[in-house]
Image (cartoon, helix red, strand yellow):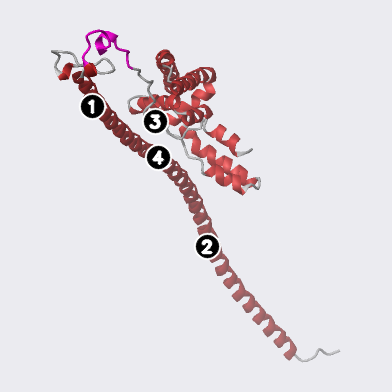
Amino acid sequence: MDLDAAADRLYGLAPGEFVAARDALAKEAKTAGDAALARQISALRRPTVVGWAVNQASRRHPEELDEFLDVGARLREAWRRQDAEALAALTQERSAATARVARLIRQDAEADGQPLSGTAGTEVEQTLDAAVVDETASAQVRQGRLIRGLSYSGFAPAPVVRPVRAHPAETGAGAGALPSGRRAGVPSSERRKGDGSTAKERAAREKAERERKEREKAASDARNAAAEAGEGHSSWEAELSEAVGEHDRLADRVAELSGELAAAKDRQAAARHRLDVARREEDRARRAAESARLRADRAEAALRDLPPAED
């Protein structure tokens, strides 16, 4: 047994079975003389329900998960190439693949008595979204050893939007054009620029772009804060589960030892009674023996005091 084999086995178990199985494997490694492996196994953390649920997809639905992660790989490549057409098609494919895998994860969790609702369901979807846009997250989901759900706080690259070429008549390139592209009788705010738009239109677009970026930043900050809070909760949730497990094991051991102690006290009381009886009887027997020896000594002395017998 090595660490990979132990981890694969443990992260395939239900969260409630993890701690006991981990401790058993660590003990097995220690008994086999591999103290370093025992420490490594003991350091493995119990997964949250969300981490466990996503981990099962790599074990129970490897083909569906591979298809889903392949969509993510192709989508990231389309982003790198700035292929707007491929991005549009893959975005739709991504939505369908995400919904399909998320549905399988929810169905399995519910069948195992761990329904994913509310925050847990949202964390599963966030984990799948992270696996689509982030290569490291994709590898973690494929490996199936998550401790908790994942999140992606950045923004996916957007395809380059290329300006539409303006018609020559709109740029003043034809006959009768004024110098510097100016046209008689056209307000400065409505004069066409090199990209075919008026200054007013450009200002409106720039304002909309600033608002979009501000909202994106606000959304990113909120997602980051939510992700940090979620990670903090997940970490303490796992810690609570381990603490409960350790407390229950020790409580059982204390109860077991308390029973043994009570039985030992009963045996000690019986031994003490036996000791008291033995001491009392030994003292009585000792005095009786001394009295008997004294009578014997007297009888022998009296016998010696008699005159010798006549022949």
Residue at (15% x, 13% y) in the render: 184
Q: Which mark is residue 152?
A: 3
Q: Which residue is denoted by mark 4 in the rendering?
A: 235
The tag earlier along the polypeptide, 2 or 1, is 1
Q: Do callouts 3 and 4 mark residues in contact (Cβ within 8 Å)?
A: no
Identity, as a three-letter code, of the amino acid under mark 4 = Ser
* Distance of label 2 from label 1 (alpha carbons): 88 Å
* Distance of label 4 from label 1 (alpha carbons): 36 Å
Left or right: 91 with respect to 211? right
Identity, as a three-letter code, of the amino acid under mark 3 = Tyr
* Distance of label 2 from label 3 (alpha carbons): 71 Å
Q: Which mark is residue 99?
A: none
Q: 76 or 128: which is nearer to us? A: 76
Number of residue marks: 4
Q: Secondary structure at mark 4?
A: helix
Q: Horizontal and vertical percent for residue 151?
A: 39, 31
Residue at (33% x, 28% y) in the render: 119
* Distance of label 3 from label 1 (alpha carbons): 22 Å
